[in-house]
């Protein structure tokens, strides 16, 4: 397997499939996917808990973690780009129940293999940090009524799961996620205080 080509092909695939999708501040959605993959790659490499082809498959699957949920791509296309293991990780990361019914998805991810939970931890970190920096755009109402009801049950469930193969990587990601949630809580309080002081 040519790992560089595998990753680059997947990146081009997600950029094309998520084309036109933006997050807060008109940032292309694929930037989030690249950050999630990059963080996971860095922490896995730092702790040396997997390498070579296995790491390549996991961090490349992280690039595609939203593709089945947020685009019209088919499972066949995902299989062709990410391979059998990568496509299984992506399928396990896909919420089939919608954002208003979060608990089935929380149970799915929390009960998934370690690689899926690592991707979710990286995803949770980036989502929390994105809201910290974009709260002035997204607003308190959106954060309280939409974002937190989705991410809080997931964070509480996944951070409590056990890891054997990727223990150190998971410990660092859990710490990052909890720190990001703490930062967001502080930013929300700051915004609420600021709003109270307005005439």
Image (cartoon, rainbow, N blue to C red):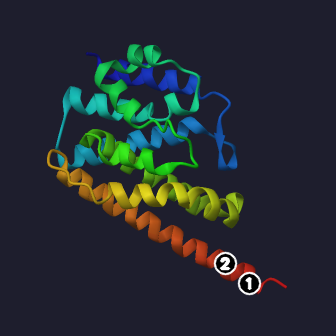
Q: CA distance from mark 2 to mark 1?
A: 6 Å
Along the horizontal axis of the image, is 138 left or right of 86? right
Find residue 85 and report its horizontal and vertical position in percent.
29, 25
Above or below residue 46? Residue 67 is above
**Residue at disc 2, secondary structure:** helix
Q: Which residue lies most toward the left here?
A: 164
Residue for badge 1: 196
Instruction: Please name whichever residue, 99 or 19, is drawn nearer the observer in this view of the structure.
Output: 99
Residue 146, quarter of the rendered image: bottom right
Q: How many marks?
A: 2
Along the horizontal axis of the image, is 19 left or right of 46? right
At x 64%, y 61%, the residue is: 145
Above or below residue 116? Residue 5 is above
Find residue 94 and report its horizontal and vertical position in percent.
45, 35
Q: Residues within 10 Å of mark 1 (few under 14, many from 20)?
A: few
At x 43%, y 43%, the residue is: 36
Residue 147, quarter of the rendered image: bottom right
Instruction: Please name whichever residue, 82 or 48, is drawn nearer the observer in this view of the structure.
Output: 82
Q: Residues within 10 Å of mark 2 (few under 14, many from 20)?
A: few
* Picture disc at residue 192: 2
* Picture disc at residue 107: none
Along the horizontal axis of the image, is 82 left or right of 147? left
Above or below residue 184? Residue 155 is above
**Residue at disc 1, secondary structure:** helix
Find residue 63 and report its horizontal and vertical position in percent.
43, 33
Image quadrant where one finds the C terminus: bottom right
Above or below residue 130? Residue 67 is above
Instruction: Please name whichever residue, 117 or 130, is drawn nearer the observer in this view of the structure.
Output: 117
At x 32%, y 40%, the residue is: 116
Find residue 90 and report its horizontal and vertical position in percent.
40, 31
Instruction: Please name whichever residue, 80 or 60, is drawn nearer the observer in this view of the structure.
Output: 80
Marks 2,1: beta carbons within 8 A: yes
């Amino acid at each position: 397997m040519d790992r560089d080509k595998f990753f680059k092909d997947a990146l081009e695939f997600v950029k094309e499939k998520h084309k036109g999708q933006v997050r807060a501040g008109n940032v292309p959605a694929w930037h989030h996917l690249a950050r999630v993959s990059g963080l996971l790659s860095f922490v896995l490499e730092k702790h040396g808990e997997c390498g070579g082809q296995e790491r390549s498959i996991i961090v490349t699957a992280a690039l595609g973690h939203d593709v089945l949920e947020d685009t019209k791509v088919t499972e066949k296309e995902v299989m062709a780009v990410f391979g059998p293991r990568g496509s299984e990780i992506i399928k396990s990361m896909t919420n089939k129940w919608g954002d208003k019914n979060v608990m089935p998805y929380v149970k799915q991810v929390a009960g998934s293999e370690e690689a899926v939970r690592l991707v979710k931890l990286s995803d949770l970190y980036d989502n929390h940090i994105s809201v910290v920096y974009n709260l002035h755009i997204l607003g308190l109402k959106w954060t309280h009524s939409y974002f937190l009801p989705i991410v809080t049950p997931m964070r509480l469930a996944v951070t409590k799961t056990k890891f054997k193969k990727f223990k150190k990587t998971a410990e660092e990601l859990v710490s990052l996620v909890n720190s990001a949630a703490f930062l967001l809580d502080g930013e929300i309080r700051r915004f609420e205080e600021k709003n109270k002081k307005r005439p």
